[in-house]
Image: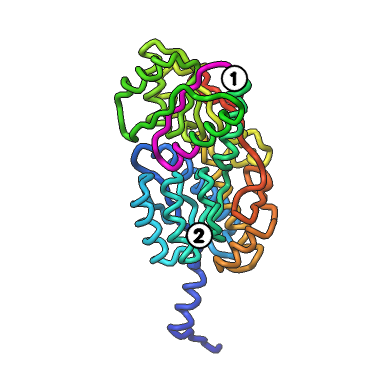
Amino acid sequence: MKKFFLSAAVLLALNSTANAELIIGFAGPLTGGSAALGDQSRNGVNQAVADINEKGGVLGEKIRVQFEDDAGDPRQAISVANRMVAEGIKFVIGHQNSGASIPASEVYAEAGTVMISPSSTNPMLTERGLTNVFRTCGRDDQQGIVAAEYLLKTYKDKKLFIVHDKTQYGLGIAEEVKKGVNAGGLVEVGYEGITVGEKDYSALISKIRETNADVVYFGGIYTEGALIVRQMRESGMSAPFLGGDGLFSSEFAAIAGPQANGSTLVTFGSDPTKNPAAKDVLKHFVDKGVNPEGNTFYAYAGVQVIAQAITAVGTADAGKVAEKIHSGMAFDTVLGPLRFDEKGDIKKLDFVFYKLENGKFVEN
């Protein structure tokens, strides 16, 4: 019997093939004031990778995720982006906050890294002609229209007070709402900015009270929004409180307290848990005791888009993958079929209102 011996080089090559993996980066706020939103997306990415790997991975390679915390801070986001680029990562799910995503995207653009944000809604993210930047969520100029139309329909002859947190996201969505209601003949009685991280909003609430506002719109994240509405209710103000997708978290209800029930409305994408395409994935989350709220399914869909695009082109070449995502291909995702336009936005308007009821946001 002949014996065959493999050289060290051949053994190394075989071992490398056996252990081949596709690394996808995740970037988002895992600490800080918007950490709950980062957790949503992390849950989505983890489950998507587990499901894809269980079916054999992508082109025979298992996916591994490198998680990075940017704390929702623009400067940390740039550092995270530079670190992942330096390590050769070509695909990133993130970032979450628009203020972090926009500067980080410049780093990825220079390196040719494909970036898919599950939650950054500021239009500027995809308005700069960056061919490698995408999002699975909608835009604030879409979200703002939905909110403005509701305000014009419900409060046309009432007094509106607008508040924002001065961030690219919060100020951006507030500006879109202001533009929309002004165009419809409703002029706000107040327009105030707050500082992220503040705890005492008594001065702001006094200003709102002085205007006799009938409704308050807030552009910002759940942390500050919940404190504002809680302190409004504690001071005896019952004006309805409206906001955007940055409020969509169970943490909002926990901080705001029961007095926010029934009088808090937020815009977000239509409930993905009701989509037949998400049925099996929803069961996976439920079995693990994970609440797939907010951005969870949007992050899951981002991984699906990357995996399907790589499979379609037959290579993990980021440039070719970006071209395929732009090609008009329909990606089968937990959000339903997704197609992307030339800017990197999804080709559908997908914002509806949710009302806070019994501590949960329910599609209105």
Where is residue 79 drawn, in percent x and y?
A: 35, 57
Q: Residue at x 55, y 34 (%)?
A: 179
Quarter of the image where the N terminus is located = bottom right
Query: In 3D space, how far apart are the residues under numbered discs 2 and 1 (Cα atoms)?
Result: 46 Å
Where is residue 169 drawn, in percent x and y?
A: 46, 40
Classify residue 76 as left or right of residue 178.
left
Residue 275 is tagged as: none
Question: Furthest residue to the bottom?
Answer: 2
Q: Residue at x 63, y 68 (%)?
A: 314
Three-letter code, disc 2: Phe
Please indicate, yes or no, whether residue 242 appears anywhere in the rendered image: yes
Q: What range is drawn magenta here?
A: 157-173
Residue 208, placed above or below residue 104: above
Helix, strand or loop under label 2: strand
Q: Residues within 10 Å of mark 2 (few under 14, many from 20)?
A: many
Residue 156 is tagged as: 1
Where is residue 325 drawn, in percent x and y?
A: 63, 58
Helix, strand or loop under label 1: loop
Nearer to the camera, 252 or 181: 181
Q: Residue at x 51, y 63 (%)?
A: 22
Three-letter code, disc 1: Lys
Sequence-first disc among 2 and 1:
2
Q: Residue at x 43, y 67 (%)?
A: 88
Q: Which residue is mark 2?
A: 91
Q: Quadrant of residue 148?
A: top right
In reply to whether residue 362 is colored magenta, the answer given is no
Classify residue 164 as left or right of residue 360.
left
Where is residue 177 drawn, in percent x and y?
A: 54, 32
Q: Residues within 10 Å of mark 1 (few under 14, many from 20)?
A: some
